[in-house]
Amino acid sequence: MTRLLYPFFGFGLLALLASCAGPVASSSGRDYWGHRPGPRGFTTVIIDAGHGGKDSGATSKPTGQQEKDLTLDMAKRIRAELSGNFHTILLRSDDTFVDLDERVARANQYGDAILVSMHFNSGPRQLRGPETYYWRVDSHGLAVRLQRAMAQASPGEHSNRGLVRRRLRLTRNPEIPCVLMEGGYLSHPAEARLICTPDYRQRLAVAIAAAIRTQATIGDAGTGPLPPPLTAPPSRASDKRE
Ligand SMILES: [Zn+2]
């Protein structure tokens, strides 16, 4: 019911309603813009392991590990943590290249679902810590939860940008709530060595799964006001490096 009212009452009311968890219907189903509160009660979690095949992503300087292998390992760990509660889908389950537009197309086959994409970062040597990217309004609460969860699982990992609103192909183009996580910097020597350890990756995966379960249970409650709706065209391969 409430979703029908949004066009008439405007975004201010939408934000107000979303801030008091009770009466707002869960966002579910596909929606082109995602100008709506975050999802609650979703049943499917689509997990995207960044990169793959010919696209190896970043390389860990101290350990030589490649981002594509670490993201696949994380995706499988997150799936294992969630599988009792959700229908889970991996957009790739082995070392194959999947184009970003193809990943979006596959994600858009599902309605009552969210998409989380796992990456590890690379940048100037001093940067460290997890970051989380989102673009759609209905992805904000989930992004806040995922960033908090990763930050708590990685004490001491800071001086990062935290939560970032950025239009990427996997944050703008899917028609379901979608978030891209950077689990830490492979370019930072200490953090790269931490990411190298299975125990740390498991800790991250457990925290990420818990954040997803919380989102499914209470929606956006406690994640702060919704960001303003933005209208921008879908992200394209030519836009920028992703
Ligand atoms: Zn990446």
Image (cartoon, rainbow, N blue to C red):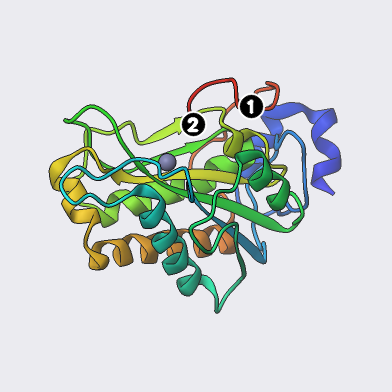
User: Is 225 placed left or right of 186 in the picture?
Assistant: right
For label 2, the crowd category at 10 Å Cα-Cα, with few meaning under 14, some 14 to 19 and many 20 or more, is few
**In the image, farthest residue toward the bottom:** 84
Residue at disc 2, CB closer than 8 Å to ligand 1:
yes
Vertically, is 209 above or below 52? below
Q: Which residue is mark 2?
A: 242
Residue at horizontal 13 percent and vertical 46 percent from the top = 190
Question: Label 2 near label 1: C-beta < 8 Å?
Answer: yes
Name the image quarter holding residue 14: top right
Residue flagged by tag 1: what amino acid is it? Ser
Hey, what amino acid is under mark 2?
Glu
Identify the mark nearer the N-term, 1 or 2. Answer: 1
Compared with 235, 38 (above or below) is below
Give SS at disc 1. loop
Q: Is residue 134 left or right of residue 87?
A: left
Can you give x and y, in whole percent of width and height, for residue 226 in the image? 57, 35
Question: How far from the left and from the top, in percent, is residue 65?
Answer: 27, 52
- Please indicate, yes or no, whether residue 24 appears anywhere in the rendered image: no
Residue assigned mark 1: 235
Residue at 79% over, 35% down:
6
